[in-house]
Image (cartoon, helix red, strand yellow):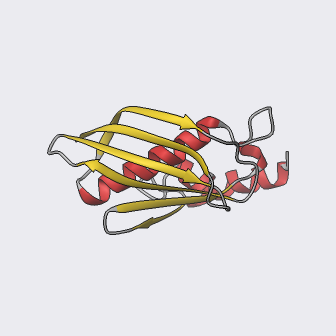
Amino acid sequence: MDETQARSSFEEALRTYHQDFNTFFLARLFGMKVEYGEDSCTVAMSVKDFMFNPQGSLHGGVTATVLDISMGHLLKQHVGAGATLEMNIQYIRAARKGTLTARSSFIRKGRQICFLRSEATDDSGSIVASATSTWKVL
């Protein structure tokens, strides 16, 4: 593991985070960039070796975090703050380098419950993982 890169990412996150959307600690630690479309949210981050599992690929929990954040930010942008009630993830291939990009969209918008989906892809456009989730509007 590149310890210098890991320390630098951690110190930058500590220095720049705010407890708010787009700037909370994990988003800063993982270097996430968030963009909003008309009915979508895209979250992108560079894959770094301090995010790896023991097999040398991006840890599934990090992938799940990016998927969850893409859906949560979309909900916040279009409906309001919410909480994940459940999330189902399918891991399709390992990510080891480059950029991981998660793009979310609504399946159904309700007043109290919303259903969303997100798909994470690598630099080649291959699907790394996909998720569906149920959210409670707060």
Location of residue 88 in the rendering, given as x and y in whole percent from the top left corner:
44, 32
Q: Nearer the viewer, residue 11 or 9?
A: 9
In the rendered image of this protein, does residue 129 appear above or below residue 21?
above
Q: Residue at x 70, y 42 (%)?
A: 94
Q: Residue at x 41, y 54 (%)?
A: 104
Location of residue 73 in the rendering, given as x and y in whole percent from the top left corner:
38, 54
Instruction: Decide if residue 59 is on the left or right side of residue 25.
Output: right
Instruction: Decide if residue 114 is on the left or right side of residue 64.
Output: left
Instruction: Decide if residue 52 is on the left or right side of residue 89.
Output: right
Q: Nearer the viewer, residue 81 or 97?
A: 97
Residue 70 visible at all = yes
Q: Nearer the viewer, residue 105 or 61?
A: 105
Q: Residue at x 67, y 42 (%)?
A: 93
Location of residue 61 in the rendering, given as x and y in whole percent from the top left corner:
59, 36
Q: Residue at x 79, y 32 (%)?
A: 54
Quadrant of the drawing holding the C terminus = top left
Location of residue 63 in the rendering, given as x and y in whole percent from the top left corner:
59, 43
- Residue 1: quadrant of the picture: top right
Residue 14 visible at all = no
Count of numbered circles in the view: 0
Q: Nearer the viewer, residue 65 or 20?
A: 65
